[in-house]
Image (spheres, grey):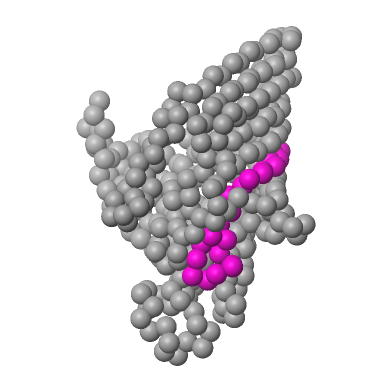
Amino acid sequence: MTIARQLHPHPDGLGNLPSQVWLPGIFIQDEIQISTRNRLLLGLRYDYNTAHGSILTPRLSWKWSKDAQNIFRLTAGTGYRVANIFTEDHASLTGAREVVIANNLLPERSWNANLNYVTKFYPRKAGFIGLDASLFYTYFTNQIVPDYDTDPNQIIFDNLDGHAVSSGVSLNLDFNFLNGLKIIAGATAMDIYRVENGIQLPQLFAPPFAGTWTVTYPLAKWGLSFDYTGNLNSPMHLPVLPNDPRPEQSPWFAIHNVQVTKSFKSGMELYVGVKNLFGFFPREDVILRAFDPFDKRINVDNPNGFTFDPTYNYAPMQRQRALLGLRWKLK
């Protein structure tokens, strides 16, 4: 049983008014071994939320092991959650826009399915290669979506009057070579959208393609380790205003990081590196009217009536950053 505590403004406007929500629940699960290669997992969870009533969430998972190196999993079920807009949507904390909660927010509900395939290869003199691929589909109702477009000075939160869909495919590769070189790479292609009043709208800040990678190479003789990490993002839809000079979509961009670590027998590690190696910067006007954060000059040379607005940002606002550090591992 869980007790969730939230703070709400007190009627006098000076303090907080704590509220308590009781969340008793029960979870039942049964694993059935159909054969040596087939397993079925059935689960059922019941929760009672004093604010939202009874909530039932069933789940099913099937595992087929073709052999030790090839495993398939199929999972399906439902879920629910009570979204916390102030911890999940950081734009609500910038102070640049008024946060408006249009109605009593209902819990988000989802129906999802996932097909996963895991395998390993063992090439000669190369170590091993692991592959993890997934197809996924999720259908949301009551999704809580921030509205940046209705009023440029507000973020309006409300349950979606319609539905939303998140579907796609992901692929992860893990290369482990006998010389110590290790490469981990992953890519995800997604189609995320919502449907309101019969109109399909794209999800903001959701790139259709994203990739990450990590390359590690140790030189044990010298006690050195070289690390190269990064991520790649495709264009994503962004919140823009009428007559906004900024484009509605971001460009393709990648962030690269490098680090060298020196290890000593005493357990000390000295590392030096650079984050955002090539200095990617979104654009100079990514924060609208950054020079006037309190809108004191809103009527000066501002024909479109723009106000200070940082919600457009989609990438780190820092160029190259050097780092130097020391770690001590106690053995």
Name of the residue lying farthest toward the bottom? 301
User: In this image, 154 relative to 9: left or right?
Assistant: right
Whether residue 244 is situated above or below residue 168 in the rendered picture: below
Report the front residue among 327 and 105: 105
Q: Chief secondary structure of the magenta span?
A: strand
Q: Residue at x 55, y 26 (%)?
A: 47
Give x and y (percent) for residue 94. 40, 62
Q: Is residue 254 magenta?
A: no
Q: Residue at x 74, y 9 (%)?
A: 35
Name of the residue lying farthest toward the left? 266
Report the front residue among 52 and 306: 52
Report the front residue among 310 and 266: 310
Write down the quadrant of residue 38 in the picture. Answer: top right
- Quadrant where the N terminus sits is top left
- Quadrant where the C terminus sits is top left
Write down the quadrant of residue 172 in the picture. Answer: top right
Q: Residue at x 42, y 67 (%)?
A: 96
Give x and y (percent) for residue 69. 67, 22
Report the front residue among 126 and 259: 259
Whether residue 268 is situated above or below residue 34 in the rendered picture: below
Q: Magenta residues? A: 135-156
Give x and y (percent) for residue 322. 33, 59
Whether residue 77 is situated above or below residue 44 in the rendered picture: below
Give x and y (percent) for residue 330. 23, 29
Name of the residue lying farthest toward the front? 11
Write down the quadrant of residue 270 in the picture. Answer: top left
Q: Residue at x 64, y 51 (%)?
A: 160
Q: Is residue 153 magenta?
A: yes
